[in-house]
Image (spheres, grey):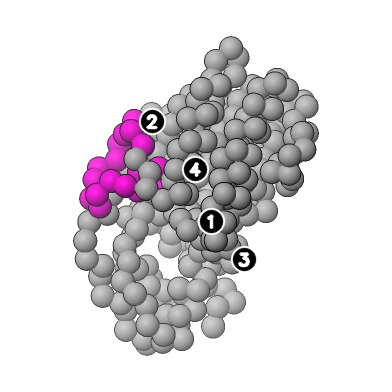
Amino acid sequence: MRIALTGASGLVGRFLLRAFRAEGHQVETLPGWRLGQPAPLDGCEALVHAGFAHVPGKYRGGEGDDPQRFVALNRDGSLRLFEEAKAQGVGQVVFLSSRAVHDARPAGTPLPDGTPVAPQSLYGRVKAEAEAGLAALDGAGFRTASIRATGVYGPGTGHKWEGLFADYLAGRPVAPRKATELHGDDLSAAILLILARGAHGAFNASDLLLDRHDLLAEVQRLTGCPHPLPPRADGPVSVMSCERLTALGWRPGGWEKLRDSLPAMLAGIS
């Protein structure tokens, strides 16, 4: 399959690019999709849209001091890209959305597939509106899907826990936190399944509910670091269940995948 991919150089896109190529797909990267120029989609059978413009290191709050530009680049740019894909005969589009489409719901709310969106942050709203615009184009041989991913982790330069690990190993204070996490390879596998099955609609993608106390206990085990662990986080977390992906045969790696990834994620951190 010839797949067009936005965001290939990003923290998530690098997992997708590697996975797609490993499966034998031809990948066309689209680094300039936001610039108002026609996207080079000719001959592509699928588009995976993982690109997103934001303040470095932030998704919620990623608009910085220019929310209008944030909306124009991400919502409006995405909708224009989806329309171009349909016009140029691309058969499938998968959009990388986010669990932030539910961030107005109270903490601890169960989030099964099909839960109506309830965004609160501008980031969540932009993702939800791009989802809706894509879904409105579905049909007449044009198959569309959105994947609502939770926090994505995995090895690589600048990975999401690089600063956290450095702080812990240096003995600096670490705030308690508990959140849902997903390995980038498992997200890639989910998108490949959606493409292979020609699946439509919105899919939750989440794996571990992870407390920093437990994560750093693994770091302590691997490194022998003597510093105390942070206390466990209080309060509930809204957890997405992933029935639709599970029905396609998706099985994320859980704790085994996390433990296997940690040595590479710790490499170079002193």
267 or 93: which is nearer to us?
A: 93
Residue range (magenta):
100-117
What residue is shown with label 2? Answer: 244
N-term mark: 3 or 2: 3
Q: CA distance from mark 1 to mark 3?
A: 23 Å
In the rendered view of the protein, which quadrant contains the C terminus?
A: bottom right
What residue is shown with label 1? Answer: 63
234 up-or-down from 124: above or below? below
At a point 73% along the width and 39% down the height, the residue shown is 36
Secondary element under disc 1, as helix, strand or loop, is loop
Q: Is residue 165 left or right of residue 109?
A: right
Secondary element under disc 2, as helix, strand or loop, is helix
Magenta segment, prevailing SS (helix, strand or loop): loop
Q: Could you say which quadrant of the image residue 98 lies in? A: top left
102 up-or-down from 214: above or below? above
N-term mark: 4 or 3: 4
The residue under label 3 is which amino acid type? Thr
